[in-house]
């Protein structure tokens, strides 16, 4: 079964689709380092390192060598941006000027049997819910019946608490033939102890000497409340007077819990993710383990770019579990 992926990143979603049986005939990624990552690991993939606006303007049937309606799956997740709501039509024109617009253009031009659109959970409430409403209306207007779910990766064999919004659309003429059921949660919910054994060496950031000494005071599973108040107050500065639990500050993970959501930067004051046993951030390779990338998956670019690629990815295992259900649904046609 053939797929085209937009905003492919470092390949977490694409790898999950491949493991489920899909054959990619095109992956579009604007960031050169991420595109290099895709090319380095899968030389046989048709990786297109270009602005999606340039590609969406083409005759996509000729470009990919397929006819309208032939493509099995269009996948990807456009970054979340506010829309214009021009005349409150909630149609394709309302999305013009956003990256999602190009996803919708691909959908309109190729009319795949099924699409998979993934994003952050916050898309539902973004701009008071109007962004999600517009996206949903555009999908319907292009002829698709849409099912929306929120998945926590930890429930599907991933050692990470990471929620993703998943929208799956079935072309209206196929809704009687294609049935896609959600994946069943895994009986085993892995924790960091299960995945941090024998991690290959690789690049990683370090804390400053002063921050490292403070983190040595934080017990595994603890955060700023677990160290002397005067030290925490001096470290937190203006954050000390903020409301809320601020549980991400000076947060040290435990081997007996899953990772918190892997982020694009290894060390930010309000979203710390300290290693359970050492006073340092996770390495790129350790974050990749949390995202279920195989150890031989090579990340290209600077260390910062590698962290960003891993942090932006869909966990490979979660992508596989969802893609497997899509594959089974299409197989039953």
Image (spheres, rainbow, N blue to C red):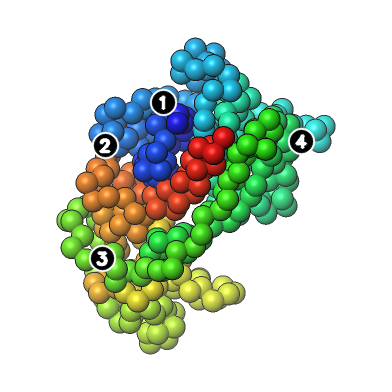
CA gap between label 3 and label 1 equals 34 Å
Q: Earlier in the sequence, mark 2 or mark 3?
A: 2
Give the left or right position of residue 161, taking residue 288 as reference: right
**Label 3: which residue?**
196
Instruction: State which mark lies toward you, 3 or 1.
Output: 1
Instruction: Residue 47: name its quadrant.
Output: top left
Circle on res. 41: 2
Give the residue displayed 24% in from the left and 69% down from the top: 209
In the foreground, 256 or 122? 256
Task: Please identify the residue farthest to the right as the structure is shown.
Answer: 87
Residue at coordinates 27% horizontally, 50% vertically from top-left?
Answer: 294
Mark 4 and mark 1 lie on one chain; the one further toward the N terminus is 1
The answer to whether marks 3 and 1 mark residues whose Cβ atoms lie closer than 8 Å is no
Q: Check the image and report above or below for 246 versus 324.
A: below
Mark 2 or mark 4: name the one nearer the start of the chain: 2
Residue density around tag 2, few if under 14, some if 14–19, many if 20 or more, within 10 Å: some
Alpha carbons under labels 4 and 3: distance apart: 46 Å
Measure how far apart labels 2 and 1 are at the Cα level.
Answer: 16 Å
- In this view of the protein, which residue sits in the foreground, 111 or 63? 111
Residue, disc 4: 90
Q: Is residue 264 visible?
A: no
Residue mark closest to the camera, 2 vs 4? 2
Estimate how packed mark 3 is, as few (under 14), some (14 to 19) or many (20 or more) residues with alpha carbons within 10 Å: some
Q: Which mark is residue 25?
A: 1
Residue 282 in sight from this viewpoint: yes
């Amino acid at each position: 079964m053939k797929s085209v992926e937009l905003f492919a990143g470092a390949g977490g979603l694409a790898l999950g689709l491949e493991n489920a049986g899909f054959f990619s005939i095109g992956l579009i990624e604007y960031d050169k380092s991420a595109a290099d990552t895709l090319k380095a690991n899968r030389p046989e993939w048709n990786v297109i390192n270009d602005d999606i606006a340039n590609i969406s303007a083409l005759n996509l049937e000729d470009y990919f060598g397929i006819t309208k309606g032939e493509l099995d799956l269009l996948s990807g997740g456009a970054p979340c941006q506010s829309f214009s709501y021009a005349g409150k039509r909630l149609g394709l024109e309302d999305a013009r000027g956003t990256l999602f617009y190009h996803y919708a253009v691909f959908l309109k031009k190729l009319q795949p049997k099924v699409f998979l659109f993934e994003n952050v959970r916050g898309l539902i409430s973004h701009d008071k819910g109007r962004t999600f409403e517009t996206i949903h209306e555009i999908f319907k207007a292009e002829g698709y019946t849409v099912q929306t779910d929120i998945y926590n990766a930890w429930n599907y064999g991933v050692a990470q608490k990471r929620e993703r919004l998943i929208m799956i659309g079935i072309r209206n003429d196929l809704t009687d033939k294609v049935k896609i059921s959600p994946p069943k949660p895994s009986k085993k919910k892995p924790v960091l102890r299960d995945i941090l054994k024998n991690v290959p060496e690789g690049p990683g950031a370090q804390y400053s000497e002063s921050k490292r000494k403070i983190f040595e005071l934080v017990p595994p599973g603890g955060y700023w409340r677990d160290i002397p108040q005067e030290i925490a107050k001096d470290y937190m500065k203006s954050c000390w007077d903020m409301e809320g639990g601020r549980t991400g500050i000076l947060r040290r993970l435990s081997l007996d819990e899953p990772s918190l959501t892997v982020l694009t930067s290894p060390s930010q004051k309000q979203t710390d993710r300290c290693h359970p046993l050492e006073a340092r951030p996770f390495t790129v390779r350790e974050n990749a383990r949390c995202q279920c990338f195989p150890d031989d998956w090579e990340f290209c670019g600077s260390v910062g770019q590698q962290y960003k690629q891993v942090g932006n990815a869909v966990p490979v295992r979660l992508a596989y579990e969802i893609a497997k259900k899509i594959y089974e649904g299409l197989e039953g046609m």
